[in-house]
Structure formats: C-alpha cells, structure tokens
Amino acid sequence: MNNLSPAELVLVKKACEITRDALNYAQTLIKPGISTKELDILVEKYIIECGGRPACKGYEGFPATICSSVNDMIVHGIPSFQTVLKEGDIISVDLVVEYKGYHGDAARTFPVGKISPEKQRLIDVTRECFFKGIENLKVGHRLGELSHAIQTHAETNGYSVVRELVGHGIGKKMHEPPNIPNYGKVTDGPLVTDNAVLAVEPMINMGRKEVWLVEDGWGVVTRDGKPSAHYENTVHVTKDGIEIWTL
Ligand code: MF3
Ligand code: CO
C-alpha cells in the first residue's frame, strides 16, 4: 500500500476535490434527453477548467473522460451520442482526475427523472455498502474485513456482488496495489497500513453476480439484464481514522 509524503497527499486531495466537483456538476446535467457523449464533453471541459486532466481518456485506449454505464451496464460504458437518457433510467458516472501527477477516483449512480422504488433501493444499498465497508477499514486489520462487510450488506438485501472488478490503491497511478474485492472473508487480504490512499468501489447487482463484456471491449453488463449500481470514493486511511476525499 502506498505511503505518500505530505506534499504528495496535498496533490491527491486536490485531484479528489476536482473529481467530486465534476461528479456534482455531472449530476446537474443528468435529465431525460441528454446523451452520454454530451455529458462526457461537458464534464471534460469542466475538469480542464478546474486545472485537472481527465485521466481515463487514453487510459489503455479508453476514448472518453467519463465512464457512463446505464441500467444493466455495471461499469466502463463508453459515452455515445446514441445513448440518450430517458426517464426511469439509472446512470453510473465514474471518473478519474489527475492533478500534477496524482489521481482521484470516484463514481456515483444517479437517477434519471423519476425511477422505480426498486432501482432507488439498489442505489441506496450500494452507497450503504461503501459506508459499511469503510467502517471496517482499519490500520493493522485485514483488508478482508472491509470486503466481507460490503458483501454481507449487499447479500442481506438480496443483491449480489460483482467479482470481476475490484477497488484499488491510487496515487501516482490510477491503479496501484492492493486489489480491494467487494467480497471475501475477514481473514483475506493484506493488513491495512498507515497513510494509504485507496479507492473503495462496491459494484452491486440487483440480480445475479455474473457479467458479460460488450462488443466494444469496455462495457461490462449483467448477464441477467437486471440493473447494477456503483458507488466509489477515494479515501485516506490513518491510525486516527478515515477521511473520504471525494465527498
Ligand atoms: N474509474 C475506474 C476505476 O475505478 C477506471 C476507469 S477505467 C478507464 O478503476 F479505463 F476508463 F480509465
Ligand atoms: Co476506481
């Protein structure tokens, strides 16, 4: 796990603040009739105005600033003028900002207009999974305590946890060790070290856990076609507790 200097942490924190602000801005744009590409263009402009760099763009060939994943798409949706939001949809927006070489990463699932109570509950429980997880993220404890808490909360509510995608360390690079699964035993994983920056990101399916990769090689959808939600923040863990930097 990383252990950045105070000066480096200032830059991570700034990247996280731009990430947070860009997600809040995205939320104001989400309404029936907007396409995910229009959303992407506006959010990219916003991040650049804030002095950040959209770090997903060009990452392993990903072509956009935001990942925009609608309904049964779990993550990594490529924005498109053809994907037009409509009342009742849910959209997960995931983005990473780089600021002077350091990264912040966060995701939210937003409702489009009025959504069903079932979809709202999925969004709410996915957010709760994140908070149950970080309640169990403690220096000197196994990372598996967080993973187990997330899985337990999701499954207690009748949902399933995606296995193929996990959270991660973050800092100088978007993806750093350790992997942070959203499932597992309390005895799994490494011991959490002091001063680590981590991206914790439950991806929770309303139905079954299995996924498909779509033809563009990026989008990941549920096999059963049921909706999925995502909630992610970049957090700083110390002996004194946890700070959430993208909230
Ligand atoms: N934000 C994603 C994550 O949590 C990464 C996006 S993949 C990219 O790991 F290729 F689009 F950058
Ligand atoms: Co992430």
Image: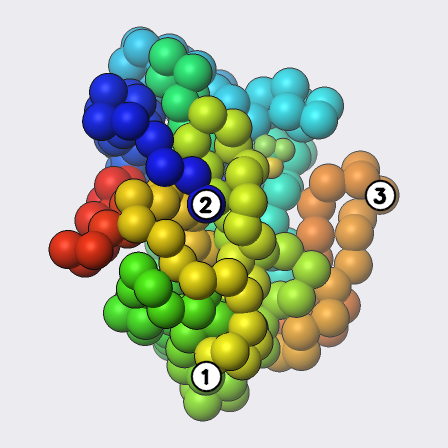
Q: Residue at x 69, y 60 (%)?
A: 164
Query: Is the image coloured rainbow, by chain, by secondary structure, or in one colour?
Result: rainbow
Q: Quadrant of residue 113?
A: bottom left
- Of labels 1 and 3, earlier in sequence is 1
Q: Secondary structure at mark 3?
A: loop
Which amino acid type is marked by label 1?
Thr
Ligand 2 is within 8 Å of the C-beta of the residue at disc 1 = no
- Residue corresponding to mark 2: 1
**What is the crowding at mark 2: few (fewer than 14 residues within 10 Å), some, or many (at least 20)?**
some
Q: Residue at x 57, y 53 (%)?
A: 179
Q: Name the residue rendered at 32%, 71% in the picture.
A: 136
Q: Is residue 238 left or right of residue 115?
A: left
Is residue 38 or residue 5 the one in the foreground? 5
User: Which element is circle 1 on?
Assistant: helix
Q: Position of residue 35 (x, y in %)?
A: 53, 33
Please report contact status of discs 1 and 3: CB closer than 8 Å, yes or no: no
Q: Does 159 sit above or below residue 124? A: below
Q: Is residue 142 above or below residue 164?
A: below
Cβ atoms at labels 2 and 1 below 8 Å apart: no
Location of residue 167 in the rendering, given as x and y in whole percent from the top left corner: 52, 52
In which image quadrant can residue 141 be found?
bottom left
The Cα atoms of the two marked residues, 2 and 1, are separated by 25 Å
> In the rendered structure, which disc, 2 or 1, sits on the residue that comes first in sequence?
2
Q: Give the number of the mark in front: 2 or 3.
A: 2
- The residue at which mark 1 appears reads as 152
